Amino acid sequence: MAGNRSGPGIPETPDRDRFTGVLMPVGPLELSVEEVRQLWSFIHGDIMDGSMRRLLRASLGLCPRHTWAYAVIEIELWQAGAGARGGHQPFDVTILYEDLLEHVAEGLARKSSLVHRHPDEVLLPVGPCRICQDMASPALPGLRMGYANSSTEALTVEANALVHTNTWCLETVGLWRDRVCPDCDPATPERAGDPVLLCRFHLAGRRPLPEQIRNAVASRLRDVRSRMRYLTESMTDYGAPVGAAENTSWIEAIGFFAGWGLPLYLATDVEQDWPRPGGQRSEQGD
């Protein structure tokens, strides 16, 4: 993938040091015990704090690894909930990324002015990943307990199995496969594909963006957000069930903010069943 085809990395731009984290390669996500401990506590507490939400807007969420980890941990570990699935769903994730999608879309759709000379700077975070920051802090003395004295080791094994995340990705692959960022997809020739589908990392690597591209990306993000709002409602007591387009929305949202490495990896085993652009399916040996 461009900027990531030889392994984890980010586009070479003058703003390199302003990116939050690096894109994940197309490969497995093996979470450490400490990552699970931090994110499980984050889901139960920090994400509900108003000041934390403002910090997350500034940092455009978490780094790519911890953005996907955040979704995985909520989906894998949250056992019960409202809606048709009754649990194992990305409720906190959709609430946060609804807000971030609108934040970025609004910024991209702005007209250039003396105040906003470069509207595409909204693609660049101005703060660090909260989880990376916490993990880099000096270890405190004493036993490190999981949220509500949970067994973090057991939760880590459960999270890394990716049972429910894998189900979400495979159930919806027919819709999201042709919406993948072309620069995240090893099957796409470098610098080919629709630029409107680029993730924020690869869009930022092509700055300055023409106004037409900025507006088209903003429109796409608002479409994803609209479908994701229905998904969020479906995970409450009063929400109606949703279809595949809504169930795909959170994957598209996370793909935009954190790249597509994890869903591409999870779908690898069923590549022959992917609907390719133009209605073509890949054949064995392609």
Image (cartoon, rainbow, N blue to C red):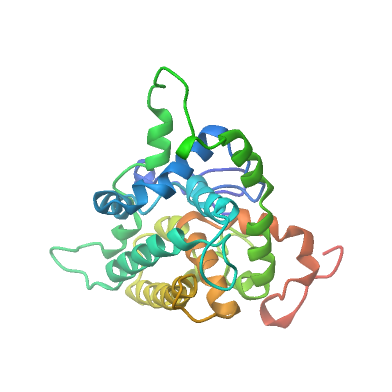
Pick whichever, 207 or 148, lies toward us: 148
Task: State which quadrant residue 220 falls in.
Answer: bottom left
- Indicate whether 272 appears above or below 241: above
Pick whichever, 243 or 101, lies toward us: 243
Pick whichever, 118 or 167, lies toward us: 167
Q: Residue at x 31, y 62 (%)?
A: 120
**Position of the N terminus by quadrant:** bottom right
Task: State which quadrant residue 232 falls in.
Answer: bottom left
Residue 207, how many percent across, how many down? 37, 59
Q: Residue at x 58, y 59 (%)?
A: 88
Q: Residue at x 53, y 40 (%)?
A: 36
Task: State which quadrant residue 222 falls in.
Answer: bottom left
208 horizontally vs 193: left or right: left
Q: Taking the image as drawn, is residue 274 in sight?
A: yes
- Indicate whether 2 appears above or below 130: below
Q: Taking the image as drawn, is residue 186 in sight?
A: no
Residue 209, how many percent across, how many down? 36, 66
Residue 134, how many percent across, how many down? 39, 34
Residue 211, how many percent across, how many down? 32, 74
